Image (tube, coloured by chain):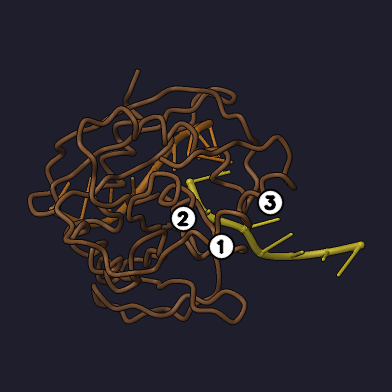
Chain colours: A brown, B yellow, C orange
Amino acid sequence: MIPHEWPKTESEAVAIQERLRPLVRIEEPPPIRTAAGLDVAYRDADEIVAAVTVLDVTTLSVVDSAVVRGMAEFPYVPGLFAFREAPPLLAALGELSVRPDVLVCDGQGLAHPRRFGLACHLGVLADLPAIGVGKTAMGRYEPPGEERGEWSPLRLDDDVVGRALRTQSGVKPVFVSVGHRCTLDAACDLVLRLSPEYRLPETTRTADHLGRTHP
DNA sequence: GCGACAG
DNA sequence: ATCTTGTCGC
């Protein structure tokens, strides 16, 4: 984990994103045997619950997990999502006894106004391959073909920043983008492997369930 | 000024 | 994210 700080103002937050953004690497990831799902549930006021589950990619069984409760230290601001959710998620990652091969984040990676979404932030700070899987798009896209596995480019400004990927035939696509140390092809392959039955990858589903049911 | 805006 | 009724499907 590289040293990091958390901002008090929005302009400080933007400055941190600009400073960390050059650290993002797009490359073929090592073979992936385990994948971590990360999600945050919101309780009363600013009380939040960060949940991480580690799944065996072959069997999709949970092999490790961690939950951290805390208070949100930053308001929800589109584009500054990570400053709200990353601190408890990093704490939860630190409590794992297994180091996952990749982080599957609930949100965007490079599909971000400054090309540094939550998945980039977590990947860079944890120094792990990371991808973003969003339920809504950050950018423009044409609907992909209706069959599972079909996809279309996700564009922001004039860049292709990710893909709208159909994980289930006839169901709204998810929005996949690179976070860190991964390629877009590898990210989409992984998301399809993790989503044999439902729209969202099992990593996200198990983490969401864990955070939501934790006392 | 108006709309858009990850979770 | 979360607030919420009924409804469709496995």
Quarter of the image holding residue A19?
A: bottom right
Depth check: give the residue in front, A201 or C2. A201
**Cα–Cα gap, marks 2 and 1:** 10 Å
Q: Chain of mark 3?
A: A
Q: Are marks 3 and 2 in contact (CB under 8 Å)?
A: no
Which is in the foreground here, disc 3 or disc 2?
A: 3
Depth check: give the residue in front, A126 or A193. A126
Q: Residues within 10 Å of mark 2 (few under 14, many from 20)?
A: many
The residue tagged 2 is A120
Element at badge 3?
Answer: helix
Tell me the amino acid under the disc marked 3. Answer: Ala
Depth check: give the residue in front, A96 or A58. A96
Q: In the orientation shown, which residue stands out farthest toward the top?
A: A215
The residue tagged 3 is A15
Where residue A39 appears, as percent x and y from the top left, is: 39, 40
Q: Residues within 10 Å of mark 3 (few under 14, many from 20)?
A: few
Q: Are marks 3 and 2 on the same chain?
A: yes
Left or right, A89 with respect to A61, comes to right
Element at badge 1?
Answer: loop
**Quarter of the image that includes the C terminus of chain A:** top left
Q: In the orientation shown, which residue stands out farthest toward the front?
A: A3
Which is in the foreground here, disc 2 or disc 1?
A: 2
Check the image and report above or below for A133 versus A72: below
What residue lies at 40% left-to-right and 57% top-to-bottom? A132
- First in sequence: mark 2 vs mark 1: 1
**Cα–Cα gap, marks 3 and 1:** 15 Å
Where residue A27 appears, as percent x and y from the top left, is: 33, 69
Q: Chain of mark 2?
A: A
